[in-house]
């Protein structure tokens, strides 16, 4: 019985991490070519919420887009930029860096079915 409860709680933790993976995108401007958005990095506390940077991006109707952002929640700010293609098979790529020790590259494929 204990193993079943442990597996269930791990599954719920993984599911909640997946749900929170997509930031909230607030549209700034929109037309038939696409939408310009801002996605603030909001960290709530018990009594308030602080904004530690944001991401600005463009999302096109076909699903392609670009973004650039900053995260100031750490002692050294981290900057990132990336892009994605549209369609049923979307390729994504991006880089992030704090200018010193924290550097990263990410890539992925999204398949819509």
Image (cartoon, grey):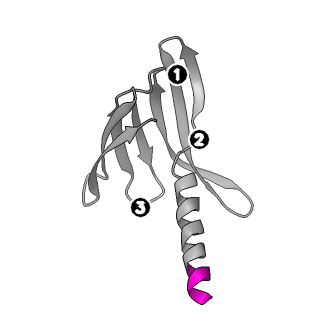
- Closest to the camera, between mark 3 and mark 2, is 2
Q: Position of residue 13 (x, y in %)?
A: 56, 68
- Identity of the residue drawn at 35% across and 43% down: 80
Circle 2 residue: 24
Magenta segment range? 1-6
- The image's mark for residue 35 is 1
The mark that comes first in sequence, 1 or 3, is 1
In the depicted structure, whether residue 73 falls above or below residue 112: below
Out of 77 and 97, give the one closest to the viewer: 97
In the depicted structure, whether residue 54 falls above or below residue 27: below
Q: Position of residue 75 (x, y in %)?
A: 41, 61
The mark that comes first in sequence, 3 or 2, is 2
- Identity of the residue drawn at 51% across and 24% down: 36
- Identity of the residue drawn at 42% across and 44% down: 70
Circles 1 and 2, Cβ within 8 Å, touching? The answer is no
Sort mark 2 into few (<14), some (14-19) or many (20+) by Cα contacts within 10 Å. few
Out of 67 and 51, give the one closest to the viewer: 67
- The image's mark for residue 75 is 3
In the depicted structure, whether residue 33 falls above or below residue 52: above
Residue 5 counted in the magenta span: yes
């Amino acid at each position: 019985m204990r193993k079943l409860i442990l597996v269930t709680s791990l599954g719920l933790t993984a599911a909640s991490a997946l749900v929170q993976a997509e930031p909230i995108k607030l549209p700034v401007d929109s037309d038939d070519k696409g939408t310009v958005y801002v996605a603030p990095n909001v960290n709530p506390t018990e009594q308030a919420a602080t904004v530690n940077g944001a991401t600005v991006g463009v999302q096109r109707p076909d699903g392609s887009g670009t973004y650039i952002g900053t995260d100031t929640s750490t002692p050294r700010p981290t900057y990132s930029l990336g892009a994605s293609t549209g369609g049923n098979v979307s390729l994504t790529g991006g880089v992030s860096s704090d200018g010193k020790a924290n550097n990263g590259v990410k890539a992925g494929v999204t398949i819509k079915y």
